[in-house]
Amino acid sequence: MNHRQIARDNYQTYIWFRSAAEQGDAYAQFNLGLMYKKGDSIAVDHERAFAWIRQAAMQGLAFAQNHLGAMYYHGRGVTQSDADAVFWFRRAATQGDASAQQNLGQMYRKGRGVPQSDELALAWFYRASEQGVASAQSLLGEAYANALGVKRNDAMALAWFRKAALQGDPAAQLNLGLLYRRGQGVAQSDVQALAWFRQAAAQGVAAAQRQVGVAYA
């Protein structure tokens, strides 16, 4: 299939999504919004992306609500608003959307749009982690490692970093390597530390690349 055929097929996708979206189909509204957001076979238009994603979110589509929260957070297609970002992240998070749960946790951790609370951040990270979100598991590991909203617990930090690292999360791989190097929550092992540093380094993590360099110095 050549590029012209792909472009023609993508435009047909746009036509069908638009037809369904104009009839009120929430999934089509969301996907049409994504096409405007990404410029997929049509010109990038963040304002139209926001408008269509908002329509889907208003119909209760959780992943559209999470996307809408992100658009408010970044001020993309709409005036930036932490309060509105929190509103939509919460709508999606309470429906069980794991990405929104992590995003809401980050808002509490940073104190953006809500009073800062490491305890509430931890609670939302935990919900996302239980759904297998690697980046949330890594954040949960950081909370246990640094006593953020919970008593410091190196064994729990190790467990959550390992879960995330095994899914390929680079921050967790770096932190797991650091725990092995220091012998925190686990028997000290330079071999294991280097193995995890190398995995994170391969994903471009500068701090991990530095650790690998030090190991070979």
Image: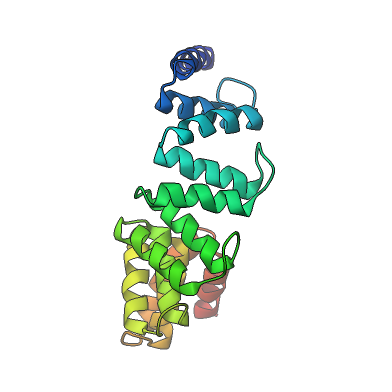
Residue 157: x and y in percent read 37, 77
Residue 159 shows in the view? yes
Quadrant of the rendering where the C terminus is positioned: bottom right
The colour scheme used to paint the residues is rainbow
Q: Nearer the viewer, residue 52 or 204?
A: 52
- Vertical relation: 45 (above or below) 80: above
- Vertical relation: 143 (above or below) 47: below
Instruction: Answer with left or right where residue 154 lies relative to residue 148.
Output: left
Residue 187: x and y in percent read 31, 87
Q: Nearer the viewer, residue 8 or 39?
A: 39
Quadrant of the rendering where the N terminus is positioned: top left
Q: Which residue is situated farthest in the right direction here?
A: 79
Q: Nearer the viewer, residue 79 or 168?
A: 79
- Vertical relation: 95 (above or below) 176: above
Q: Nearer the viewer, residue 95 or 110?
A: 95
Residue 81: x and y in percent read 65, 50
Residue drawn at 41 percent across, 85 percent down:
152
Residue 197 shows in the view? no
Q: Which image quarter: residue 156?
A: bottom left
Residue drawn at 45 percent across, 82 percent down:
147
Residue drawn at 35 percent across, 47 percent down:
95
Residue 126: x and y in percent read 36, 65
